[in-house]
Amino acid sequence: MQSNQAAPGGKKLKVLIVEDDRFLQKILLTKFEKEGYEVRGASDGEEAMQALLAETPNLVLLDLILPKMSGFELLSEMKTSDKMKQVPVIVLSNLSQEEDLTRARELGAIDFLTKADISIHAVVERVKESYAKYLSKAH
């Protein structure tokens, strides 16, 4: 296992994938699992919040357009929670306007990927890079 797939302490990196498109969520879950990650999926903002409260992941891959609670609302909730504010979030969304990117970053997202512009393989690679960069800044 490569070091960027391990959480501090050598355990598998836990990734929460929040995506309401069930087909895309399944593809992402399968790809990340094959890459050696421990994954969990959530299909809406409320389910994601419950998952975050139940078990804090090392990283969240977050869509912004979600039922019940938007990705922006989830980011905002995470930012105000002592338990969740340190969890890095990478946005994967169809929203690609500059104001969406700026808002996501202001709410704490460490990276922003546009679905239409990136392959599944590239998502995994970018997550590895962004998480490694996040860890190097955190220490």
Image (cartoon, helix red, strand yellow):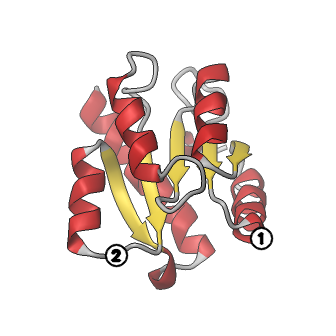
- Number of marks: 2
Residue at image position (39%, 21%) is: 81
Residue 102, compared with residue 57, is above or below; it is: below
Q: CA distance from mark 1 to mark 2?
A: 21 Å
Please indicate whether residue 38 sits to the left or right of residue 133 in the image.
right
Residue 65 in picture, x, y percent from top left: 50, 62
Residue 128 in picture, x, y percent from top left: 49, 53
Frontmost residue, 96 versus 123: 96
Please tell me the numbered disc located at residue 96: 2
Q: State the image quarter where residue 78 is shown.
A: top left
Please tell me the numbered disc located at residue 23: 1
Residue 131 visible: no
Residue at the outermost top position: 82
Residue 63, compared with residue 23, is above or below; it is: above
Residue 47 visible: yes
Amino acid tagged 2: Ser
Residue at image position (39%, 50%) is: 72
Amino acid tagged 1: Phe
Please indicate whether residue 37 sits to the left or right of residue 3 in the image.
right
Residue 19 in picture, x, y percent from top left: 63, 58
Residue at image position (59%, 29%) is: 52
Residue at image position (30%, 37%) is: 136
Q: Secondary structure at mark 2?
A: loop
Please tell me the numbered disc located at residue 119: none
Mark 1 neighbour density, 10 Å: few (under 14) some (14–19) many (20 or more): few
Q: Earlier in the sequence, mark 1 or mark 2?
A: 1
Q: Secondary structure at mark 1?
A: helix
Frontmost residue, 89 versus 43: 43
